[in-house]
Amino acid sequence: MDCIFCKIVNKELPADIVYENENVLAFKDIHPKAAVHILVVPKIHIESINSENSENIVGDLILAAKNIIKRDNITGYKLLFNIGREGGQMVDHLHMHLLAGNPS
Amino acid sequence: MDCIFCKIVNKELPADIVYENENVLAFKDIHPKAAVHILVVPKIHIESINSENSENIVGDLILAAKNIIKRDNITGYKLLFNIGREGGQMVDHLHMHLLAGNPS
């Protein structure tokens, strides 16, 4: 498997990890678009929201984001999925952007 | 209940409805930010992603979006939640933006 996010999940590549539980890993985006820009990913490899049954794991991603924003006292934020190249998806491992604060 | 999206769900206010199932209603945003700009909302009133157990209904919204994009042959798209006033949430009934095509 040559997936960069799988390698981050497996700790084979470095990342600035901000949250982890049994099913989910969250780490800082290396090209932040806002003061807070975190990627929340399932540990299992799923290509995108378009993949079959993706809707069954999105709840885990949302819950992880809610835990992060409570822990970090973030009051307003955005959760964003880009799907497909035309939708702006750059890595084919499902990921949710958590964005807060001013654009950077 | 003085919630504009509840009124749309209850057909007390008009909207350009594009999809409906038992749990979810989807309709065109009246101020579109892209060629396709649809709001996907749960029929029950939940204030936001920050509300307790919101993660349990997000799967229904995602599945509805997937049904819409398959039906309408949309290849690339974005799914966005704005949470809290600082996050850009304007209506306090949980809603997911489905965006595709060029910004408008």
Image (tube, coloured by chain):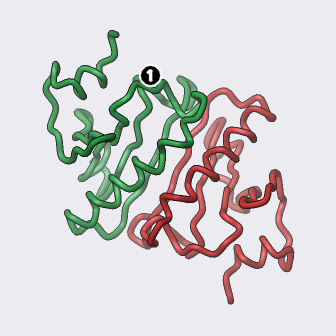
Chain colours: A green, B red
Is B80 situated left or right of A90 in this image?
A: right
Quarter location, residue B39: bottom right
Quarter location, residue A50: top right
- x and y percent of residue B74 in the render? 71, 31
- In the displayed structure, B86 sits above or below A63; it is below
User: Residue at image x 66%, y 27%?
Assistant: B75
Total count of labels: 1
Q: Residue furthest front?
A: A22
User: Residue at image x 73%, y 62%?
Assistant: B30
- In the displayed structure, A56 sits above or below B19; it is above
Q: Amino acid at mark 1?
A: Asp
Residue nearest the observer in this picture, A10 or B88: A10
- In the displayed structure, A14 sits above or below B54; it is above
Residue corresponding to mark 1: A92
Sort mark 1 into few (<14), some (14-19) or many (20+) by Cα contacts within 10 Å: some
- In the displayed structure, A94 sits above or below B81; it is above
- x and y percent of residue B94 in the render? 57, 67
